[in-house]
Image (tube, rainbow, N blue to C red):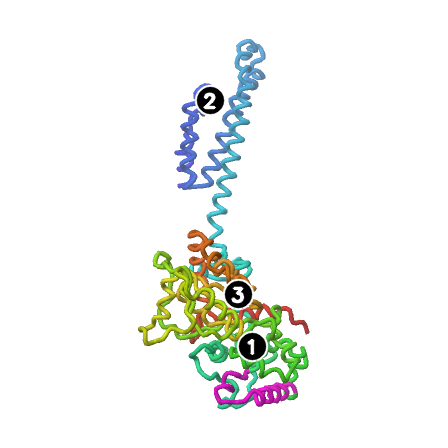
Amino acid sequence: MYKKTIINAIPNRPYPNPNRNPIRFLRLLRRLRRLRYRRPHILAAGLLHSLTLPLRFSLSPVMSAIKHPFQLTSSSSRLCSLRASLLTLAVLTFLSLTYLSFTSLHSSASSSPSQLPVKLGGIEDAADDEISDVYHSPEVFRLNYAEMERKFKVYIYPDGDPNTFYQTPRKLTGKYASEGYFFQNIRESRFRTEDPDQAHLFFIPISCHKMRGKGTSYENMTIIVQNYVESLMSKYPYWNRTLGADHFFVTCHDVGVRASEGLPFLIKNAIRVVCSPSYDVGFIPHKDVALPQVLQPFALPAGGNDTENRTTLGFWAGHRNSKIRVILARVWENDTELDISNNRINRATGHLVYQKRFYRTKFCICPGGSQVNSARIADSIHYGCVPVILSDYYDLPFNDIIDWKKFSVIVKERDVYQLKQILKDISDMEFIKLHKNLVQVQKHFQWNSPPIKYDAFHMVMYDLWLRHHVIKY
């Protein structure tokens, strides 16, 4: 069949001379060009024939002169066309090579999407794993995340009575629910291993939030944590192997900072996964991990793609339990464009009035409370309101993974007096871009049970996976 196709494509009759019959010659080239989608080898054969045509006709006068030396007079006129024929050959060769180069580039470009998942760590469904430029290094994140899912292992110390302060969380609701979700998810996840020799990190499963719920005093918390960690050090060899560098503990309640004060080496060496990542309480960004404080379950669905409904410039309502909140309420409480309340919205005013305000607002002010962190940041992200971070010395959750400047506004506390003008200077196009990126990161600030890909639990695990690479022993 291939032979028949070639014969049909290149007729077995005298080849057209491009100098004498250019129309017939171009028809042959067009016929060959139509074959490029059918049989690539036929196209190559046709191009080879077409390239040799000018050479054959150019050399024919010379061959004739050699065979018939006494007819040079009649052949000399034909030799005059040799230069033009060679020029034609050069032009055709250039055009053919250019065409083949473009064809090669097109074929390699069209085949690259199918090879992409293999290059990026074996992720099969690229549509489900869309990585936007909201990340500092999108491709690095994709590669490392896939490697984490395949390899990361964590050993949970089995010691401690689950009915007291160990192993199990207090609850999965409230503003400290992040600690509870992590405790539950790590036990049920693929990352857990029963073999400590296979573990990359070791989890110290003590819940400070649970201590607080049982009414334990701060002094007793410190003693409990100290006795528990020292018992692990004496019973197992793993702490002394790295002086605790490959160990971590999780606490969302601010009492976790105070409860660990009795063990300076725990704070200095181990990885602290905390909801209060303030630099003035010893948080070390390259070692510790900022745990997002998420108030779940959310009362209303996630917001997004609704910028036309957001007519209020800025919104905040809450307790004045910090210096920056007192200043915010005093300066902007009576402003007509900023919706600022100096207290929490009373539930008696209506059902979910506070949450519904997020849907109507472009920017949600998130001032630090008694600690630098605030559950209001995750609320703003969930409801599609661009958060305005008004808190100094705050290492934001996943700050080394995602670029917060692409979906939030970060304002120093000293600039609270210019807050309104800062927000008004943001153009509509800039706001739309911030809002679009905000929708992209909503999945990272959502806890699930069981956990799902890219949610808050997996992002915390990814941060831990990055930390374990710097541990050498």
Q: Position of residue 294 (x, y in %)?
A: 45, 73
Judge whether 390 appears above or below 167 on screen: above
Chain part drawn in magenta:
205-233
Type of residue at label 2?
Answer: Asn
Residue on which disc 2 sits: 17
> Which of the two residues, 40 or 431, is positioned nearer the viewer here?
431
The number of callouts visible is 3
Q: Please tell me which residue is depicted at 47% across the width and 65% down the height of the picture.
A: 331
Q: Amino acid at mark 3?
A: Tyr
Residue 270 visible in this rendered orientation of the protein: yes
User: Dot 3, how many residues are within 10 Å of its Cα: few (below 14), some (14-19), or many (20+)?
Assistant: many
Which of the two residues, 87 or 423, is positioned nearer the viewer here?
423
Q: Check disc 2 and report its element: helix, strand or loop.
A: loop
Q: Is residue 172 left or right of residue 206?
A: left
For label 1, the SS is strand
**Considering only vertical position in the picture, is 131 above or below 171?**
above
Mark 2, mark 3: which one is toward the viewer?
Answer: 3
126 above or below 80?
below
Residue 379, x across and y down, in percent: 43, 69
Residue picked out by circle 3: 145
Q: Earlier in the sequence, mark 2 or mark 3?
A: 2
Residue 67 vertical position relative to residue 438 in the rendered view, above or below: above
> What residue appears at the point 55 percent right and 86 percent down from the top-left corner?
158
> Looking at the image, which is closer to me, 69 or 169?
169
Label 1 sits on residue = 154
Residue in the foreground of this view, choosing between 427 and 253: 427
Give the CA separation, mark 2 to mark 1.
Answer: 77 Å
